[in-house]
Image (cartoon, rainbow, N blue to C red):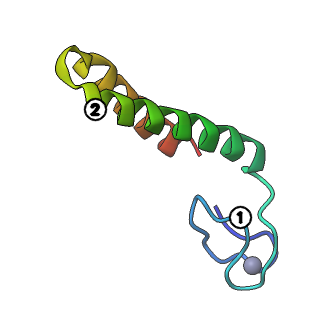
């Protein structure tokens, strides 16, 4: 993605253009949802890691979903 104003390449997670300060519009809603979900999943991971044992399937799934979300932007 690029800045609407100065067209420099932006990182996926940028909220503002580091060059001109323009607010990045496109991903806001999705990104906010994604961040919430990722936070929840990280909490789940933390819980799972404290348990370990038979939780490896969920653990793998959570990693998978986090990766997916990270790429969906
Ligand atoms: Zn810019």
Q: Quadrant of residue 33?
A: top right
Q: Nearer the viewer, residue 36 or 20?
A: 36
57 shown above or below 17: above
Residue at 33%, 19% (x, y): give it: 58
Q: Is residue 16 left or right of residue 38?
A: right
Looking at the rendering, the quadrant in which ligand 1 lies is bottom right
4 shown above or below 25: below
User: Where does the image place residue 40, in percent across and percent down from the top left?
Assistant: 54, 33
Residue at 81%, 75% (x, y): give it: 22
Q: Nearer the viewer, mark 1 or mark 2?
A: 2
Q: Earlier in the sequence, mark 1 or mark 2?
A: 1
User: For disc 1, does the CB lie below 8 Å from ligand 1?
Assistant: no
Which label was assigned to residue 15? Answer: 1
| Tally of numbered tags | 2
User: For disc 2, does the CB lie below 8 Å from ligand 1?
Assistant: no
Q: Residue furthest front?
A: 50
Q: Is residue 20 left or right of residue 12?
A: right
Q: Which residue is mark 2?
A: 50
Residue at 64%, 65% (x, y): give it: 14
Q: SS at mark 1?
A: loop
CA separation in Å, label 1 and label 2: 33 Å
Whether residues under marks 1 and 2 lie with C-beta atoms below 8 angstroms apart, the answer is: no
17 shown above or below 2: below
């Amino acid at each position: 993605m690029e800045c609407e104003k100065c067209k420099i390449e932006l990182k996926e997670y940028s909220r503002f253009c580091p060059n001109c300060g323009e607010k990045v519009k496109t991903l806001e809603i999705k990104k906010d949802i994604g961040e919430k979900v990722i936070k929840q999943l990280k909490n789940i991971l933390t819980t799972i890691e404290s348990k370990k044992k038979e939780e490896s399937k969920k653990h793998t799934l959570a990693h998978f979903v986090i990766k997916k979300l990270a790429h969906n932007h």
